[in-house]
Amino acid sequence: MPSKNKSYLKSESLKIVGHGKLKGSIEISGAKNSALVLLAASLLTNEKIILENVPWLTDIEKMINILTNLGVKLVNKNNKIEIDSRNISIKELPFELVNGLRASFFCIGALLAKFGEVQIPLPGGCNIGLRPIDEHINGLKKLGAEIIIEEGIVKAKLKREREKLYGTNIKLTCPSVGATETLIMAASLAQGRTVIQNAAREPEVQDLCQMLKKMGAKIYDSGKETIIIDGVNELHGCTHKVIPDRIEAGTFLIAAAATSSSITISPVIPNHLEAVIHKLRETGSLIMIRDNSITIYGKAIKAVDIETAPFPGFPTDLQAPFTALMTIANGESKITETIFENRMNHIHLLNKMGACIKLDQNTAHIKGVQNLNGMDLVGSDLRSSAALIIAAIMAKSTSRIFGLEHLDRGYENFESKLSRLGIEIKREFHKKILIEKEYKLDSQVIKTSEFKAA
Ligand code: UD1
């Protein structure tokens, strides 16, 4: 569980003993990216939504704070959240809460459709590129919104004399996950039919459509490139279980492949992981799929090339962990990032550990080495932190990975799951709050019990 005391976040690290092997089975949590958008979608109804299998993560906490600030009542117990949006009074999202959580911007479609106006600061998020919002804005304008951006605030309202958004044809320039979700939510309460072409097909988009359909939305062909939505007058309450996190699942499979280990993960939806399973099999791993569980038997690692792509292609969110795996493969591999322009933050850190990677813009050319060396390093975004942890498990000696504020955004109980699989891993709390430049300074480690008392 991530620390609640934010001022201490930067002074935490994971101490990982290298040459680890994973053994046994673990449970995969609910999907972060689904849960975030489903929380936003709950704003579309005045009736109660019950979300099950919600992972407990700092990104989810941030989204809950944003909804609470709008006047939503949330009751949260054992990964189950009851959401009551009846009494929303505010339609402005405060900058301090929105900053750092890109997904909070996805509330724009729901709030605009329900209230006819909304003001949201431009979103923050992971340090992995520009991540513009033009697809969201252009689509909402086509649905009948007037939108201006003033001093960093996106101000959206219905065109004069309009009581609702109205259905239209929208062709996305790129199949943005967030924009597809924003527009589906907005179109659900619009007047008439909306057709979204070049829509994202990610499982999280499909999960959103499943929940909206339970709420009474009329959505056809989710999971295809063209989605059709017939707007309805109102949406109702429902109970919905968040799908398993395919990125968490993929991260554990990659960790097992990287350490020639055998583990079983469940629950998963295997066809959400097809591209990843295919590539892991190419590296030499044996993979068995049975219902909602996957068992991997890691073997000697062959080098393979990957290129990230929208679903059903290889997910950009697993590019960094897969790069860590390729550092010790037999042979040379080429990894190309095509979705984000700045998602190679892990390369120079893996090189520090002894990897042999040449970066040419968004392509990493990797020559496999025998071993990596343990080190103290700082993760700079969510998935690069996961990559460093996998590298630390593979390495010859002990490592400390800092920057856990990124990891805690997206992996529920990561270290306790790894520990259950047999990895020697421990969260340490340092007395000094380290600033970025100081991460590598020696710092006195204190016991967890002392930290809790502080
Ligand atoms: C979501 C996921 C993230 C994942 C990404 C791609 C959530 C909370 N996050 O992010 O984990 O890595 O999908 O699978 O669900 N773009 C534009 N204009 C826009 C929107 C996006 O040009 O209006 C570009 C982005 O800069 C990026 C690409 O499209 O290069 C993909 O972004 P998008 O699919 O929107 O990612 P997110 O929804 O932010």
Image (cartoon, grey):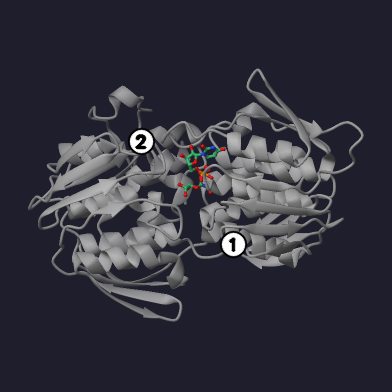
The numbered dot on residue 206 is 1
Looking at the rendered structure, the secondary structure element under dot 1 is helix
Instruction: Please provide percent x and percent y for residue 207.
Output: 60, 62
Other-residue count near label 1 (Cα within 10 Å), few / some / many at <14 / 14–19 / ≥20: some
Q: How many labels, in total? A: 2
Instruction: Please provide percent x and percent y for residue 57.
Output: 51, 50
In the depicted structure, whether residue 193 falls above or below residue 166: below
Can I make out residue 23 in this image?
Answer: yes
Instruction: Please provide percent x and percent y for residue 414.
Output: 39, 55
Instruction: Please provide percent x and percent y for residue 392.
Output: 22, 49
Can I make out residue 2 in this image?
Answer: no
User: Is residue 151 found left or right of 216 in the rendered image?
Assistant: left
Residue denoted by label 2 = 380
Q: Earlier in the sequence, mark 2 or mark 1?
A: 1
User: Is residue 350 found left or right of 90 in the rendered image?
Assistant: left
Q: Residue at x 54, y 53 (%)?
A: 200
- Residue furthest left in the image: 370
Does the closest atom of ligand 1 sit within 8 Å of the Cβ of label 2? no
